[in-house]
Image (spheres, helix red, strand yellow):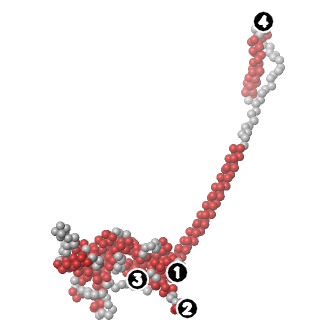
């Protein structure tokens, strides 16, 4: 069967594969067969074995660096800064609360004003809508008809009447008398101004 | 029953609040703090101050600044602990804050060319070649060499690119899992593995001349 399907885990390994799996090899997280293949490669390849040793030695040095401890004043300084931060936060909180209260009061006042204005507006509108339209009185002056008799002495009328001319122009003239009088009065008024 | 009665009669035998906090895991300590137990915060500081200091120091290479940043981490934790998602690990959250602060510090530094890591002394003589780390019981000349070794290691780490160094320190110094590192550095798992592999190889190359 082996000649039909290639072995998924051949025991030998090239340097590229070794390099790719080196991280897990150093961390010791490789599965059993992979670990064996890596170990076998280090035994066979001097260059990879040297690189592996170099990395492991460097990591050993780094991992064993002496740890540094916080300085003696570290805790006191931290406490002071925490206290300062706490006070600052409290101040901010108080300010925020006051601002919130102020904002709520302002909002309430604004809403109340808006409601009041709306009420006043609607009241005025209602009054405007329900009131009858009162127009100013129209003053018409009609002049009294002048009932005085026509006292014209125009010779033409006298002549025509006596001569028996048709009476209708006379009647027409008599009808126009008030208009003519009014016109003459109007002319007089204009001139007197 | 008798034990309970004995404890009630003798309060000294009952565990103190501090002892009870010490026995709790991080999650329980956080819950205690959020429940109003102020001493729980001191317990968190005690647990994490040295670890965070070493992590930040190895990342930025400046001890004083590292202390300042660790204090800043605790202040942020104090202020925002109520927002912490307690379904997650507290340590991952704390390291994420520290990691971000360290990254910001390095970014600010890169804008200020006056503050740089010290350069590594390259030409050690054979007799100066360090053998192991500082040990106060050693002779003065040994201590000198060991101190040199520590400096060389620290400076070699400092030579790694920032994103490699971050992953390297989290893994090799703090012992974080790949998944945790991915969460802290906000990278995917493949990137973490790739960076760690490169960081290990680079670090080995940098330090090799001084230890061979």
Please tell me the numbered disc located at residue B50: 3
Query: Where's residue A54, x and y in %?
Result: 23, 80
Q: Residue at x 49, y 81 (%)?
A: B40
Quarter in which the N terminus of chain A is drawn: bottom left
Q: Label 2: few (<14), some or many (≥20) within 10 Å?
A: few
Indicate which label's residue lies in the foreground, 4 or 1: 1
Q: Secondary structure at mark 4?
A: loop
Towards the viewer: B127 or B189: B189
Image height of B172 relative to A162, above or below: below
Query: Where's residue B59, x and y in %?
Result: 35, 77
Quarter in which the C terminus of chain A is drawn: top right
Q: Label 3: few (<14), some or many (≥20) within 10 Å?
A: some
Tell me the distance, in whole angstroms, between the alpha carbons under discs 2 and 4: 158 Å
Query: Where's residue B43, x and y in %?
Result: 47, 82
Indicate which label's residue lies in the foreground, 2 or 4: 2
Q: Residues at badges 2 and 4 in contact (C-beta under 8 Å)?
A: no
Residue situated furthest front in the rendering = A1
Q: Earlier in the sequence, mark 3 or mark 2?
A: 2
Please tell me the numbered disc located at residue B5: 2
Query: Label 3 lies in what chain?
Result: B
Q: Secondary structure at mark 3?
A: helix
Towards the viewer: B27 or B53: B27
Query: Label 1 lies in what chain?
Result: B
Q: Residues at badges 3 and 4 in contact (C-beta under 8 Å)?
A: no
Residue A81 in view, yes or no:
no
Q: Is residue B103 left or right of residue A94?
A: left
Tell me the distance, in whole angstroms, between the alpha carbons under discs 3 and 2: 40 Å
Q: Which residue is mark 4?
A: A163
Tell me the distance, in whole angstroms, between the alpha carbons under discs 1 and 2: 26 Å
Query: Label 4 lies in what chain?
Result: A
Q: Residue at x 23, y 81 (%)?
A: A53
Q: Which residue is mark 1?
A: B37
């Amino acid at each position: 069967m082996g000649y039909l399907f290639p072995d998924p885990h051949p025991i030998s390994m090239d340097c590229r594969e070794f390099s790719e799996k080196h991280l897990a090899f150093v961390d010791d997280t490789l599965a059993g067969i992979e670990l064996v293949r890596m170990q076998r490669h280090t035994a066979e390849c001097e260059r990879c074995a040297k690189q592996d040793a170099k990395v492991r030695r460097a990591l050993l040095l780094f991992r064993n660096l002496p740890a540094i401890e916080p300085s003696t004043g570290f805790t006191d300084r931290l406490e002071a800064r925490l206290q300062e931060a706490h006070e600052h936060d409290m101040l901010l909180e108080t300010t925020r609360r006051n601002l919130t209260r102020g904002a709520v009061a302002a909002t309430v006042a604004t809403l109340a004003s808006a409601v009041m204005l709306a009420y006043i507006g609607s009241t005025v509108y209602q009054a405007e809508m329900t009131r009858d339209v009162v127009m100013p009185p129209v003053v018409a002056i009609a002049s009294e008809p002048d009932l005085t008799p026509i006292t014209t002495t125009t010779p033409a009328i006298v002549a025509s009447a006596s001569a028996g001319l048709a009476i209708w122009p006379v009647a027409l003239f008599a009808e126009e008398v008030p208009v003519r009088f009014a016109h003459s009065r109007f002319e007089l008024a204009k001139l007197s101004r | 029953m008798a034990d309970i009665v004995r404890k009630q009669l003798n309060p000294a035998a009952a565990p103190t609040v501090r002892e009870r906090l010490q026995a709790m895991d991080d999650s329980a300590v956080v819950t205690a703090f959020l429940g109003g137990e102020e001493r729980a915060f001191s317990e968190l500081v005690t647990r994490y101050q040295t670890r965070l200091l070493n992590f930040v120091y190895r990342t930025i290479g400046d001890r004083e600044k590292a202390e300042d940043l660790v204090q800043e981490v605790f202040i942020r934790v104090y202020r925002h602990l109520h927002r912490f998602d307690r379904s997650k690990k507290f340590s991952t959250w704390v390291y994420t804050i520290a990691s971000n602060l360290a990254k910001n510090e390095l970014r600010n530094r890169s804008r200020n060319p006056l503050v740089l890591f010290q350069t590594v002394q390259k030409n050690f003589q054979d007799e100066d070649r360090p053998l192991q780390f500082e040990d106060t019981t050693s002779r003065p000349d040994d201590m000198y060499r060991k101190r040199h070794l520590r400096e060389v290691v620290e400076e070699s780490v400092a030579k790694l690119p920032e994103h490699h160094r971050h992953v390297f320190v989290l893994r090799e110094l703090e012992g974080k899992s790949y998944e945790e590192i991915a969460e802290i550095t906000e990278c995917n798992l493949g990137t973490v593995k790739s960076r760690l592999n490169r960081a290990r190889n680079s670090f080995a190359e940098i330090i090799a001349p001084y230890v061979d």
